[in-house]
Image (tube, grey):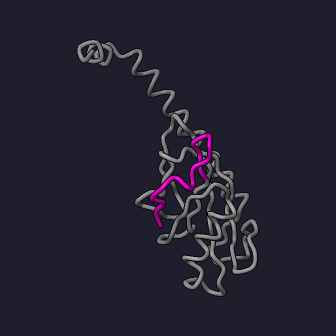
């Protein structure tokens, strides 16, 4: 799914991004997480046993937060200067949305484990960006190139 207009963008420029937490699937952006989850569930629900769909949700900058082309396990791409916030990993059915439990799917993942991994990913991304920026500031060759280009 794609959002062609800005109906999914909040006044602060952020959005909620929901995606099936699997190798192939659907995604949706919305101004609230429930609407994003429901849209993904609507698109994907008939492909899952018992109609249960694992859905990952993130909150972040509407322009830079996207589902990765190499999605596996509901991964996202994002601009490290504008970190995203993981909201959760959910099981969505036709009638309910709840945090994913180990027993919901054969893979054995759960909401808590996913949240810990996602928070670690954000922290790692921010640390790598900070280290890169510090190296750029200290590298005389980079500074020379910057001076030449201005």
Say whether residue 2 is magenta: yes
Compared with 45, 140 (above or below) is: above
Our reading of the magenta stretch's main secondary structure is loop
Relative depth, front residue between 134 and 89:
89
How far from the left and from the top, in percent, is residue 36?
62, 63
Residue 122 occupies which quadrant of the picture?
top right
Point 62% across, 50% down: residue: 59
Point 55% across, 63% down: residue: 28
Point 70% across, 80% down: residue: 94
Compared with 10, 43 (above or below) is: below
Relative depth, front residue between 42 and 109:
42
Image position of 85 (left or right of 139): right
Q: Which residues make up the magenta segment?
A: 1-15
How far from the left and from the top, in percent, is residue 83?
57, 40
How far from the left and from the top, in percent, is residue 105?
66, 77
Point 57% across, 55% down: residue: 8
- Count every numbered label the image shows and give the total: 0
Say whether residue 14 is magenta: yes
Image position of 38 (left or right of 97): left
Q: Which quarter shows the C terminus?
A: top left
How far from the left and from the top, in percent, is residue 97?
74, 70
Of all residues, the one furthest to the left in this rendering is: 148
């Amino acid at each position: 799914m794609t959002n062609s207009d800005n109906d999914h963008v909040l006044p602060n420029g952020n959005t909620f991004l929901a995606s099936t937490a699997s190798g192939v699937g659907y995604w949706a952006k919305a101004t609230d997480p429930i609407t994003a989850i429901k849209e993904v569930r609507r698109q994907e629900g008939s492909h899952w046993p018992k109609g249960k769909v694992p859905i990952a949700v993130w909150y972040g900058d509407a322009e830079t937060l996207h589902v990765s082309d190499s999605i596996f396990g509901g991964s996202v791409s994002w601009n490290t200067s504008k970190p995203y916030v993981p909201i959760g990993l959910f099981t969505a059915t036709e009638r309910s949305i709840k945090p994913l439990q180990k027993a919901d799917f054969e893979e054995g993942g759960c909401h808590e484990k996913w949240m810990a991994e996602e928070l670690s990913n954000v922290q790692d991304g921010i640390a790598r960006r900070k280290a890169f920026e510090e190296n750029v500031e200290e590298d005389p060759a980079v500074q020379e190139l910057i001076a030449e280009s201005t």
